[in-house]
Amino acid sequence: MIDFEIINLLITNASEGGQVFNWRFVFEHTVNLVILLGVLVYFLKDSVRNFLVARKGSISSEIDHAQKTITEAKEKYEEYAEKLRGIEQEINNIKDAIRKQGETEREEIMRHANIASENIKREAQDTIQFEIDRARREVQSEVVAIALTIAEKVIKENLNESDKQRIIEDFTNNLGEEKWHQSQH
């Protein structure tokens, strides 16, 4: 709407107060406008061209920079994605190593437990055998002591004086022979 009002204003001014359209007025202003534009182009064309070339160059460099940044970002992304895959693989390797180490330690603990169990069994068997042998010796010494006591009673009851004298003489003779054999060696 504003555009039509400006055109109406120009036409009204060109018609000089409502009379017939004034072509001369339009021509003079058009010539002035063309001259003004020509002067502006003549004096500003290098500046405008340099500005546009510089602007084109800066836009081009910004586009190149943006593309370079995008390329670098893609490379970084790929690098980090590869590192992430490597880290995932390393995590899996560590898990496997820990699992294997745990199994090895479990086997080692079981082996030590079995060895300890066997040692305890062997020690218990040795202790049982020792106690059996000790009990046997005690029983044997008690049996010998009882047998000697019984034999002593039987001998005392059944020995007469001549038997006693003969046993003492045999004993002394045997003792003398033993001493003689020991002195020879």
Image (spheres, rainbow, N blue to C red):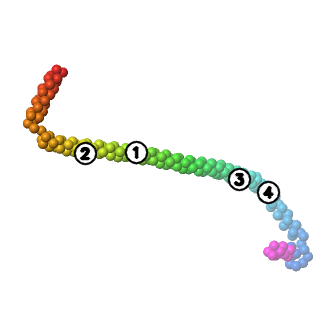
- Mark 3 in CB contact with mark 2 (< 8 angstroms): no
Picture disc at residue 63: 3
Query: Residue 13: where, in percent of width, then height?
Result: 84, 74
Query: Residue 184: where, in percent of width, then height?
Result: 16, 20
Which residue type does callout 2 highlight? Answer: Val
The mark nearer the N terminus, 3 or 2, is 3
Q: Is residue 7 magenta?
A: yes
Residue at numbered disc 4: 41
Which residue type does callout 1 highlight? Answer: Glu
Q: CA distance from mark 3 to mark 2?
A: 111 Å
Q: Is residue 58 left or right of residue 7?
A: left
Foreground mark, 3 or 4, reads 3
Residue at numbered disc 1: 118
Q: Nearer the viewer, residue 5 or 94?
A: 94
- Mark 2 in CB contact with mark 1 (< 8 angstroms): no
Q: Secondary structure at mark 4?
A: helix
Say whether residue 75 is visible.
yes
Foreground mark, 2 or 4, reads 2
Which residue type does callout 3 highlight? Answer: Ile
- Mark 3 in CB contact with mark 4 (< 8 angstroms): no
Q: Secondary structure at mark 2?
A: helix
Q: Nearer the viewer, residue 105 or 15?
A: 105
- Start and end of the magenta stretch? 1-12
**Residue for point 91% across, 76% down:** 20
Q: Secondary structure at mark 3?
A: helix
**Residue for point 38% across, 46% down:** 121
What is the crowding at mark 1: few (fewer than 14 residues within 10 Å), some, or many (at least 20)?
few
Picture disc at residue 139: 2
Say whether residue 87 is visible.
no
Which residue type does callout 4 highlight? Answer: Val
Q: CA distance from mark 4 to mark 1?
A: 110 Å
The mark nearer the N terminus, 2 or 4, is 4
